[in-house]
């Protein structure tokens, strides 16, 4: 590597301290959340394959709602980061109010949809072979888990409104602390309610759902109370509820930037759910094995997820301040840092692949499938890191139409057709189908590289 190239992709100590100051609290929060999710998954996995599969299916469906909220708030979040760069407190208040209405509408829609069609949606994933399991039992466990989880959606909504705003304004430590408290509550209640400890009844998957719901309300309480009690650090919160009205011209402005992100996250998450459904036609063991693999994969993914958030926060603030060349240079270095970090993480993940599935009380076939998925996910992790950072680079500059094409359109036009055709029309092993879907993402990597290099995202969208 030449000295010039090295300077382009490698920062100094001050640069990495700045990036890590933003990314590490997010990594810790997400890491602890996913680690407790891992323990939660293991606890449910000790009960049986059917319970674990039912919960995994519901979590896949709930992910569609989670990402809808994420996408619905993200458009206004682009403005929040740039308003913060301009020190425009009233602008931040308006984005906060817009987020409230958007999250409320999405949550009401999700509750109505899942109450009406939840059982049918779970059934979609249970049309393959039983592999010695009980498909009807998996369906019952899944629906029981779903209906309790719906009670936690208002708390999830509130957390996303506050935490997204705090992060976009540079406050990442408090969300981390709230997340730690929430997962501690979740973990303790999981142990007590799943297995019926300390004189409590054995509730199984319902107990796991109750623990998750309670922990979300704990997290919401911490975040909301802290934000309002520290108005000197969060001046935008003063008077934020004095009115719920958002000026029509700003609503239109936020919506025009946010609508592609909302549609994108909705279609992308639905696409991910469809991919799992394609894999599920190979049998119940595939659902269980993929669930095990995704659980450990989520723990390791916190690295590039946090780096994506760092791109959104840091680059958004630089663009809002009009520092275009600094934004380009910083972005190059963060992307390179993310990919290199994930190479090391992927190696560690590959090393533990044969060991992790042995923790679960399930069949050998399920464990074998899980090992294959973990190894495949490790191989493609650096690729995922680059795509994630490229996506957030484009989004930070308000290129939401481009990110819509880059993300969800690609999933539905390339990834889903590949998985659907191979799962239905061939006898190809499921791990080979999974690998072919990942290889198809090379097209997306090339497109992302070209768009980031051309600098189409270098724009200040809140300039006055």
Image (cartoon, rainbow, N blue to C red):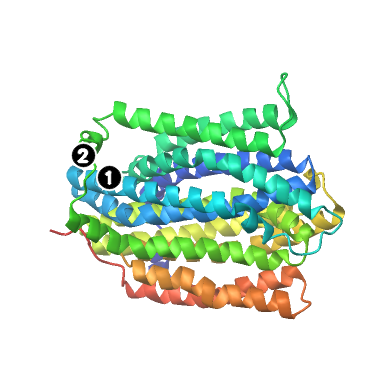
**Badge nearest the viewer, 2 or 1:** 2
Mark 1, other Cα within 10 Å: few <14 / some 14–19 / many ≥20: some
* Furthest residue in direction left, as rendered: 464
- Decide if residue 127 is on the left or right side of residue 164: right
Rendered position, 140 above or below 415: above
Q: For the C terminus, give its image quadrant.
A: bottom left
Residue at left 23%, top 60%?
Answer: 253
- Decide if residue 273 is on the left or right side of residue 137: left
- Residue 31: image x %, image y %? 55, 43
- Residue 168: image x %, image y %? 33, 47
The numbered mark at residue 19 is none
The residue carrying mark 2 is 243
Mark 2 or mark 1: name the one nearer the start of the chain.
Answer: 1
The residue carrying mark 1 is 97
- Residue 172 picture quarter: top left
Mark 2, other Cα within 10 Å: few <14 / some 14–19 / many ≥20: few
Q: Nearer the viewer, residue 227 or 123?
A: 123
Residue at left 65%, top 75%?
Answer: 420
Query: Which element is circle 2 on?
Result: loop
Question: Distance of mark 2 from mark 1, alpha carbons?
Answer: 9 Å
- Residue 124: image x %, image y %? 67, 62
User: CB atoms at circles 2 and 1 under 8 Å apart?
Assistant: yes
- Residue 212 picture quarter: top right
Residue at left 72%, top 72%?
Answer: 432
Can residue 366 be spotted in the picture?
A: yes
Rendered position, 320 above or below 361: below
């Amino acid at each position: 590597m030449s000295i010039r190239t090295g300077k382009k992709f490698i920062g100094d100590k001050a640069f990495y301290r700045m990036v890590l100051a933003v990314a590490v609290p997010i990594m810790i929060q997400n890491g602890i959340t996913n680690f407790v999710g891992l323990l939660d998954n293991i606890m449910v996995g000790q009960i049986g394959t059917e319970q674990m599969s039912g919960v995994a299916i519901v979590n896949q469906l709930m992910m569609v709602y989670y990402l809808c909220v994420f996408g619905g708030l993200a458009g206004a979040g682009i403005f929040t980061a740039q308003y913060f760069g301009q020190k425009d407190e009233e602008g931040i208040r308006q984005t906060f109010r817009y987020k409230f209405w958007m999250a409320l509408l999405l949550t009401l829609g999700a509750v109505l949809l899942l109450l009406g069609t939840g059982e049918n949606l779970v059934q979609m994933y249970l049309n393959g072979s039983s592999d010695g399991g009980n498909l009807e039992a998996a369906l019952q466990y899944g629906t029981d888990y779903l209906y309790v989880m719906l009670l936690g959606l208002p708390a999830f909504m509130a957390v996303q409104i506050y935490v997204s705003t705090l992060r976009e304004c540079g406050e990442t430590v408090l969300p981390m602390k709230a997340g730690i408290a929430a997962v501690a509550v979740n973990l303790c209640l999981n142990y007590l309610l799943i297995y019926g400890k300390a004189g409590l009844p054995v509730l199984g998957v319902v107990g796991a759902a109750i623990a998750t719901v309670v922990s979300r309300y704990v997290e919401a309480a911490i975040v909301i109370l802290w934000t309002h009690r520290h108005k000197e650090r969060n001046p935008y919160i003063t008077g934020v509820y004095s009115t719920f009205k958002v000026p029509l011209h700003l609503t239109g402005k936020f919506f025009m930037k946010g609508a592609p992100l909302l549609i994108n996250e909705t279609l992308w998450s639905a696409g991910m759910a469809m991919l799992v459904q394609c894999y599920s036609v190979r049998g119940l063991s595939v659902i269980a094995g993929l669930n095990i693999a995704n659980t450990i994969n989520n723990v390791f993914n916190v690295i590039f997820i946090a780096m994506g958030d760092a791109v959104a926060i840091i680059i958004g603030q630089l663009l809002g301040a009009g520092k275009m060349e600094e934004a380009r240079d910083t972005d190059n270095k963060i992307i390179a840092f993310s990919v290199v970090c994930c190479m090391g993480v992927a190696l560690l993940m590959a090393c533990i692949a044969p060991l992790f599935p042995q923790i679960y009380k399930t069949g050998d076939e399920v464990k074998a499938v899980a090992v294959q998925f973990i190894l495949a996910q490790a191989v493609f992790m650096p690729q995922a890191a680059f795509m994630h950072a490229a996506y957030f680079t484009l989004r930070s500059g308000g290129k939401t139409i481009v990110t819509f094409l880059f993300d969800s359109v690609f999933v539905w036009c390339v990834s889903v057709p590949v998985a659907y055709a191979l799962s239905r029309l061939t006898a190809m092993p499921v791990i080979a189908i999974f690998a072919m879907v990942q290889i198809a993402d090379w097209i997306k990597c090339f497109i992302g590289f070209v768009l980031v290099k051309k600098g189409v995202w270098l724009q200040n969208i809140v300039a006055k």
